[in-house]
Amino acid sequence: MSDSLLTEEEVKTFLGVDQVEVEKLKKRGKLTAYRIGGSFVRFRKEQVVAIRTGKRFQMPDQIDRNVFDLVRDFLRFNSIYVLLFVAITLLIFYFLKS
């Protein structure tokens, strides 16, 4: 287990669980699976260690995010909807005034 990615067998051995429990962890979102080469499934070593020790694991892109980052991401991904909402609202007010 020297790599940062572990195989399914290594995860089962490290956690001391069977295949059914690994599938439950994946479905509950506690364990994130990555496909390597189409069919080879791997797991982050840090995440597996966090499950074993009972600590909460955060993905690297979730660390140190503040309110401004969340607002920026929201506007970046939903900007068209915000613009359409503003345009429709302005049109409604324009026609109601007339």
Image: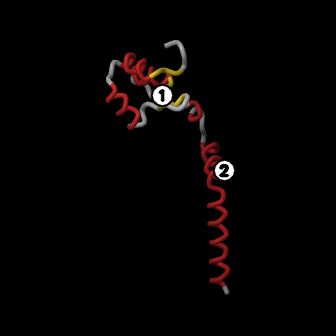
- Mark 1 lies on a secondary structure that is strand
Q: Nearer the viewer, mark 2 or mark 1?
A: 1
Residue 25: where, in percent of width, then height? 38, 32
Residue 88: where, in percent of width, then height? 63, 72
* Residue tagged 1: 41
Q: Quadrant of residue 68?
A: top right
- Viewer-side residue, 58 vs 15: 15
- Mark 2 lies on a secondary structure that is helix
Q: Is residue 67 above or below residue 34?
A: below
Per the rendering, the mark at residue 55 is: none
Residue furthest bottom in the image = 98
Q: Residues within 10 Å of mark 1 (few under 14, many from 20)?
A: some
Question: Tag 1: residue type?
Answer: Val
Quadrant containing the C terminus in the rendered view: bottom right
Q: Quadrant of residue 21?
A: top left
Q: Is residue 22 above or below residue 97?
A: above
Q: Residue at x 50, y 22 (%)?
A: 46
Q: Residues within 10 Å of mark 2 (few under 14, many from 20)?
A: few
Q: Is residue 90 left or right of residue 49?
A: right
Q: Residue at x 37, y 28 (%)?
A: 22
Counting residues from the start of the chain, the first of labels 2 and 1 encountered is 1
Q: Is residue 77 above or below residue 63?
A: below
Q: Is residue 50 above or below residue 59?
A: above
Question: Tag 2: residue type?
Answer: Arg
Could you give the CA–CA distance between mark 2 and mark 1, rounded to whole angstroms? Answer: 31 Å
Residue 74: where, in percent of width, then height? 61, 50
Q: Residue at x 49, y 27 (%)?
A: 40
Tell me whether the residue at label 2 lies in contact with that at label 1, contact meaning CB atoms closer than 8 angstroms.
Answer: no
Per the rendering, the mark at residue 76 is: 2
- Viewer-side residue, 93 vs 82: 82
- Viewer-side residue, 46 vs 65: 46
Q: Is residue 70 left or right of residue 22?
A: right
